[in-house]
Amino acid sequence: AERLVRAAGEALPVSIFRPAMVVGDSRTGAIKTFNTLYVPLRLYLTGRLRVLPVSAGLKVSLVPVDHVADAACRLTLDPRAAGLTFHLVAPAEALPTAGDLLAAVREWAAEHLGVRLPRPLFVPAAGLAARGRLQALAPYFREHGEFLRANSDRLLGPYPMRWRELLPPLLEYAAAQGFFHRSE
């Protein structure tokens, strides 16, 4: 797809946007579909996933949909963006680790759902992530992914995501929408 867009760049002012795992709105948690990060979260929250095929220290690259939409709109209208690639991601230091994220999910589930979830087991294993329901997320489970934020920071300014503030609205919205009971 990117090759086609780049080819069109000979005649049109195009840019490439590469978002992280897109999650719900940062204020309301609203999102149209529960995919990406929501798949393993649903499996974990419903007791169907306790062993995760990553290390607890894996940085989980997520970004709220409102940030992605705002960035795409602003960059589309900015002539300086033509021909550039933008990684629409939070800075690495702002991202949660898998261990921290699931610890916060466990706390939220205990407080808001009255559910005591078992501690997840992190077992980094090559190829394990690429099976079953998690297959589409395998690229996100790579331990050493690098996102180049220079273009985004230069044209949009820094993005100070606060994942601990972001998580409760995401989970509350998902729970209110029947997230736990959706069919696959």
Image (spheres, helix red, strand yellow):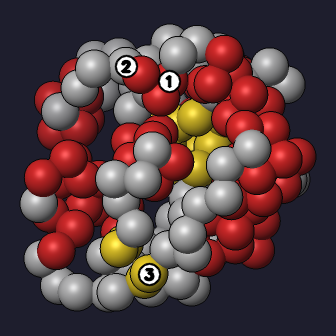
Which callout, 2 or 3, points at the residue further toward the start of the chain?
Answer: 3
Residue marked by disc 1: 179
| Residue type indicated by callout 2 | Arg
Q: Is residue 173 left or right of residue 37?
A: right
Point out residue 121 in the picture as x, y percentages from the top left corner: 44, 81
Q: Is residue 148 left or right of residue 93?
A: left
Point out residue 157 in the picture as x, y percentages from the top left corner: 84, 47
Q: CA distance from mark 1 to mark 3?
A: 23 Å
Residues under numbered marks 2 and 3 in contact, where contact means CB atoms less than 8 Å apart = no
Circle 1: is it few (<14), some (14-19), or many (20+) Cα within 10 Å? some
Image point (22%, 86%), residue name:
125
Point out residue 7 in the picture as x, y percentages from the top left corner: 18, 31
> Vertically, is 38 above or below 89?
above
Secondary structure state at the residue bearing disc 1? helix
The C terminus lies in which quarter of the figure?
A: top left
| Residue type indicated by callout 1 | Phe
Circle 2: is it few (<14), some (14-19), or many (20+) Cα within 10 Å? few
Point out residue 70 in the picture as x, y percentages from the top left corner: 71, 22
Any mark on residue 182, and which? 2
Image point (45%, 44%), residue name:
46
Residues under numbered marks 1 and 3 in contact, where contact means CB atoms less than 8 Å apart = no
Q: CA distance from mark 2 to mark 3?
A: 25 Å
Residues under numbered marks 2 and 1 in contact, where contact means CB atoms less than 8 Å apart = yes
Q: Is residue 84 something that shows in the picture?
A: no
| Residue type indicated by callout 3 | Leu
Any mark on residue 121, and which? 3
Q: Is residue 177 something that shows in the picture?
A: yes
